[in-house]
């Protein structure tokens, strides 16, 4: 009989609300015992930071990375942004996120204000984009978003 092993639990430090730079974030995560960082691709700390420098800094510190992608405005979407605009943003952000070599990409996308038929079509296209991605991708259940309610 082969014994099943439990998956390794990793704890990532979210940079949500963090206003420092990458060097400070890495140092704080390392000192606090985190396994990596989670950061929104549009986070100010990424402004002007070259992907290769970030990858190297994380590697030297032995920290992983999860990149969060948000479409349609901020964490709560702008209701005037169309599904097509969400998809364009997503198709532009996924390759940028992949270049950072994250362990995972998390999507916060869509809007719970759309009809079920529109949601279904939107998510079909999202899944096609995700399937083409070279990094594991998860879709977050998040207020005001397409997957806000796992029971729906």
Image: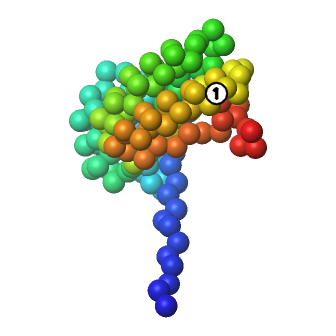
Q: Is residue 36 above or below residue 96?
A: below
Q: Position of residue 148 (x, y in %)?
A: 70, 34
Q: Is residue 15 above or below residue 29?
A: above
Colour scheme in use: rainbow
Q: Position of residue 146 (x, y in %)?
A: 65, 30
Image quarter of the C terminus: top right
Residue appearing at x 52%, y 62% in the figure: 9
Q: Which residue is mark 1?
A: 119
- The one nearer the camera, 48 or 26, is 48
Q: Is residue 85 left or right of residue 26?
A: right
Q: Quadrant of residue 98?
A: top left
Q: Position of residue 61 (x, y in %)?
A: 32, 50
Q: Position of residue 104 (x, y in %)?
A: 43, 45
Q: How many numbered dots are placed on residues in this image?
A: 1
Looking at the image, the residue that sits furthest to the bottom is 1
Q: Residues within 10 Å of mark 1 (few under 14, many from 20)?
A: some
The secondary structure type at the circle numbered 1 is helix
Looking at the image, the residue that sits furthest to the top is 80
Q: Quadrant of residue 49?
A: top left
Residue appearing at x 56%, y 39% in the figure: 139
Q: Quadrant of residue 55?
A: top left
Q: Is residue 26 left or right of residue 81?
A: left
The answer to whether residue 14 is visible is: no
Residue appearing at x 50%, y 32% in the figure: 126
Looking at the image, the residue that sits furthest to the right is 151
The answer to whether residue 78 is visible is: yes
């Amino acid at each position: 009989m082969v014994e099943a092993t439990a998956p390794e639990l990793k704890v990532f430090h979210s940079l949500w609300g963090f206003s420092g730079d990458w060097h400070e974030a890495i140092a704080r995560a390392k000192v606090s015992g985190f396994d990596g960082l989670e950061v929104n691709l549009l986070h100010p700390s990424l402004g002007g930071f070259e992907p290769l420098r970030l990858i190297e800094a994380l590697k030297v510190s032995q920290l992983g990375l999860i990149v969060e992608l948000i479409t349609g405005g901020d964490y709560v979407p702008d209701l005037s942004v169309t599904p097509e605009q969400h998809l364009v943003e997503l198709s532009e952000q996924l390759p940028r996120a992949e270049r950072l070599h994250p362990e995972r990409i998390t999507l916060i996308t869509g809007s719970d204000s759309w009809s079920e038929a529109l949601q279904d079509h939107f998510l079909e296209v999202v899944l096609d984009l995700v399937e083409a991605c070279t990094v594991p991708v998860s879709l977050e259940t998040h207020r005001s978003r397409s997957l806000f309610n796992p029971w729906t």
